Amino acid sequence: MSKKPIITVKNLVKKYDNFTAVDQISFEVFEGEIFGLLGPNGAGKTTTLEILETLRNKTSGEVFVDGFSVDKDSGSIKKRIGVQLQAAGYYPNLNLTELIELFSGLYGIAVDPIEMLSKVALTDKAKARYKELSGGQKQRFSIATTLINNPRIVFLDEPTTGLDPQARRNLWDLIRSIRDTGTTVVITTHYMDEAEVLCDRVAFVDTGKIIGINSPDHFIDELVASGFEREKQVKSANLEDVFIQLTGKDWREV
Ligand code: ADP
């Protein structure tokens, strides 16, 4: 993988009145990687993402996205990124084809709705209304909308929260396939198993500071080398493996 930075953050600070939500953080995201922002609730992950997405103003520091400054070129950044909207952003009574047409109209870009839906395995739902989709289908659809403008970077904020194990694993395949076409992915998640298998690198954020940034393997090896041992011997399968084994790995079209 190339180590060319596509996002550079230097001494970023965000204050809400007197409260410092993001406290002098600096990091880079490399082109073509899946980069995870991990940390407890209130750590400052969403605030950081929204500043990178040009949706929120920073207090101080420098942020460059694909070479453009968030201060001077937010319009250029918006054209180059895909941002996953929360479900509330969709009209529940429009069908998926109509929603893709609506979004592509907003971007001023002509796309084939069926082609976009095929990227997320939803062509058979082209005429279904958004509100008729299952949780996993809604997440896949929202990821399709991030791809409409053929972005260089997509931002996914907890994309698998609330999904069943099949939907979650299928979403991992989808996110990897986006990365494999050369798009950089920035993701937040509370699931450490997910970050471990999906992310090329992760940053741990706590109380507005980055307390570690490296590959999941590196962090785990470092912890093991320090003498850490799990209390209970880990079995070579877990209950989620049993779940998948028993119920299959097919897409569930509830
Ligand atoms: P995370 O995504 O890691 O859960 P957030 O970035 O949402 O964290 O929030 C970081 C901190 O900033 C939290 O303490 C939160 O209460 C606070 N915060 C977030 N948004 C606002 C806001 N608009 N006004 C005031 N405080 C906020």
Image (tube, helix red, strand yellow):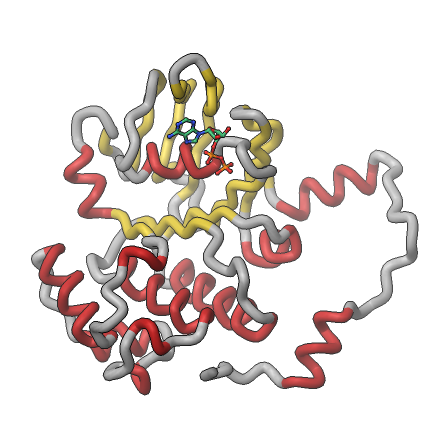
Mark yes or no: residue 1 visible. no
In this picture, is 160 found above or below 77?
below
Q: Taking 253 as reference, is 192 above or below it?
A: above
Residue 242 at x, y percent in the picture: 75, 77
Locate residue 212, reporting x and y percent.
61, 31
Query: Does residue 223 sit above or below 230 in this rendering?
Result: above
Residue drawn at x 48%, y 52% as measured from the top left: 158
Across and down, in percent, residue 178 comes to 38, 62
Q: Is residue 170 above or below residue 73?
A: below
How many labels were placed on the picture? 0
Residue at 25% across, 29% down: 70
Residue closest to the eye, 170 or 102:
102
| The furthest residue to the top | 18
- Whether residue 207 sits left or right of residue 129 in the image: it is right
Answer left or right for 43 relative to 235: left
Q: Is residue 86 left or right of residue 1?
A: left
Residue drawn 59% across the image and 81% down it: 249
Q: Quadrant of residue 202?
A: top right
Q: Nearer the viewer, residue 80 or 106?
A: 106
